[in-house]
Image (tube, helix red, strand yellow):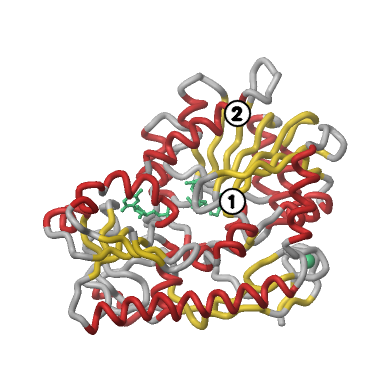
């Protein structure tokens, strides 16, 4: 039993993955002996509807000066955040707007505001990725955002027209403090716009690999609406996004400041139909996850027994959950290829599968590739047309185990 991070009611986990290493903790051989693991379990708060980890890892263990995820490695995501920036600024009427982004990483979103000379501030605790943003001319401070920091930002820069976050609000354990900070920081007509992987997609696609230490919350419109209301904020729109395997963009203002969209009403009704606020949905989800593991291991064990070589494709943070939960080993995967220099030459968390540059895959492609970067499938399948034309096959496990 633990307590809800939003409303403090007791919650019990509906799924447990056992002990997991840090999802983005790619490591060297010398670091194997000191590698630590942490319990990974998820529960539903039946009181406020928030789905969340029941135990969390200290944030400094995940976000630091050696954070290996650089947002701009995906060209598709660069385009996506260019469009998001355009959409967000289009909603602002003030003559000299001020934009704050949390989890601004290497500046993938704020660079669009910087290029237009718009006043902006990135809040990015992982100092190595923050430095990349600064090099691009994106104003960035290396801090964890919370209510205290919001007060400091107001004192130094004034109130904000826009507060943006992508794939970060679900990372912040102290969500009530973050929302209180946003309440203080936003101008009366200001907007909070954020997007994260959508619980509806996770449940419908059995994409359990979205569950790992960094993802503390699994949001849907129902739970975001409740959490915001407790902070004097109001959810006014929810717009599905075709990124990261299905995300939702939430638009939020001060209570009563903006009209509520019809789409939001429909979304809330859809979520009730899916029973996202009821334990039954998660009992089904757990069964689906167990079945998915069995199906994937049947395929991988079969290939192994026939001596057919398989490589992992993209050392995503999500892959840490799949590998260690399903029991994938070096005997199943010769290596995992990834384009991130900081991951190459290291080993995957837990199972210690070597991470190699994409060139190794290109120069000597194995007959099968397990697509850990399935959320970037459109981009990757297009890039790998030559591999596929040559007979190379991709194994995917979302929404079910299949080969392409
Ligand atoms: N927005 C980018 C990066 C997402 S990764 C994108 O969508 O691609 C999550 C980022 O949030 C990491 O760079 C991490 O360092 C940062 N982060 C984690 N906790 C934070 C906090 N409390 N405040 C601000 N940023 C945080
Ligand atoms: P993500 O799923 O957390 O966004 O992580 C993406 C990872 O996938 C990152 O390590 C970079 C890697 N990657 C590739 O190796 N090749 C690609 O074509 C893409 C898009 C990503
Ligand atoms: Zn709750």
Q: Residue at x 76, y 43 (%)?
A: 264
Q: Which mark is residue 87?
A: 2
CA distance for labels 1 and 2 = 17 Å
Is residue 277 shown left or right of residue 112?
A: right
For mark 1, does the 10 Å Cα neighbourhood hold few (<14), some (14 to 19), or many (20 or more) residues? Answer: many
Mark positioned earlier in the residue sequence (1 or 2): 2
Q: Residue at x 12, y 59 (%)?
A: 364
Number of marks in the rendered image:
2
Pinpoint residue 151: horizontal percent, then vertical percent. Answer: 70, 42
Instruction: Say above or below: 199 vs 92.
Output: below
Is residue 196 shown left or right of residue 327?
A: right
Can you tell which quarter of the image residue 355 is in? Answer: bottom left
The residue tagged with tag 2: helix, strand or loop?
helix
Name the residue beneath numbered marker 1: 196
The residue tagged with tag 1: helix, strand or loop?
strand
For mark 2, does the 10 Å Cα neighbourhood hold few (<14), some (14 to 19), or many (20 or more) residues? Answer: few
Q: Residue at x 59, y 79 (%)?
A: 287
Can you tell which quarter of the image residue 65 is in? Answer: bottom left
Instruction: Say above or below: 305 vs 191.
Output: below
Pinpoint residue 1: horizontal percent, then vertical percent. Answer: 71, 82
Pinpoint residue 196: horizontal percent, then vertical percent. Answer: 59, 51
Q: Residue at x 47, y 67 (%)?
A: 400
């Amino acid at each position: 039993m633990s307590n809800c991070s939003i409303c403090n009611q007791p919650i019990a986990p509906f799924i447990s993955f056992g002990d997991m290493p840090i999802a983005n903790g790619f490591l060297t051989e010398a670091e194997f002996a000191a590698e630590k693991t942490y319990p990974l379990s998820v529960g539903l708060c039946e009181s406020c509807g928030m789905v969340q980890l029941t135990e969390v890892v200290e944030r400094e263990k995940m976000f630091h000066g050696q954070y290996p995820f650089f947002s701009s490695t995906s060209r598709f995501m660069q385009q996506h955040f260019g469009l998001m920036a355009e959409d967000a600024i289009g909603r602002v009427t003030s003559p000299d707007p001020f934009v704050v982004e949390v989890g601004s990483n290497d500046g993938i979103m704020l660079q669009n505001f910087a290029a237009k000379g718009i006043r902006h501030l990135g809040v990015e605790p992982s100092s190595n990725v923050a430095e990349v943003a600064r090099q691009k001319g994106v104003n960035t401070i290396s801090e964890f955002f919370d209510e205290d920091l919001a007060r400091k930002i107001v004192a130094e820069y004034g109130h904000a027209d826009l507060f943006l976050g992508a794939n970060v609000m679900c990372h912040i354990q102290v969500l009530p403090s973050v929302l209180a900070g946003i309440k203080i920081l936003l101008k009366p007509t200001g907007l909070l716009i954020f997007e994260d992987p959508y619980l509806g997609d996770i449940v419908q696609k059995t994409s359990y690999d979205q569950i790992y230490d960094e993802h503390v919350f699994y949001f849907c419109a129902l739970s975001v609406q409740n959490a915001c209301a407790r902070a004097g904020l109001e959810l006014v729109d929810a717009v599905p996004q075709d990124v990261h395997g299905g995300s939702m963009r939430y638009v939020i203002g001060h209570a009563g400041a903006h009209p509520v969209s019809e789409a939001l009403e429909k979304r809330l009704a859809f979520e009730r139909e899916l029973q996202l606020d009821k334990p039954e949905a998660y009992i089904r989800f757990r069964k689906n996850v167990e079945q998915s593991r069995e199906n994937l291991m049947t395929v991988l064990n079969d290939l192994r027994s026939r001596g057919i070589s398989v490589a992992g494709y993209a050392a995503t943070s999500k892959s840490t959950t799949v590998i260690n939960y399903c029991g994938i080993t070096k005997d199943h995967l010769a290596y995992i290829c990834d384009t991130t220099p900081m991951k190459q030459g290291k080993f995957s968390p837990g199972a210690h599968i070597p991470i190699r540059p994409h060139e190794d895959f290109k120069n000597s492609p194995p007959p099968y590739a397990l697509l850990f970067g399935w959320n970037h499938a459109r981009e990757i399948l297009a890039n790998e047309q030559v591999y596929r034309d040559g007979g190379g096959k991709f194994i995917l496990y979302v929404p079910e185990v299949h080969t392409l």
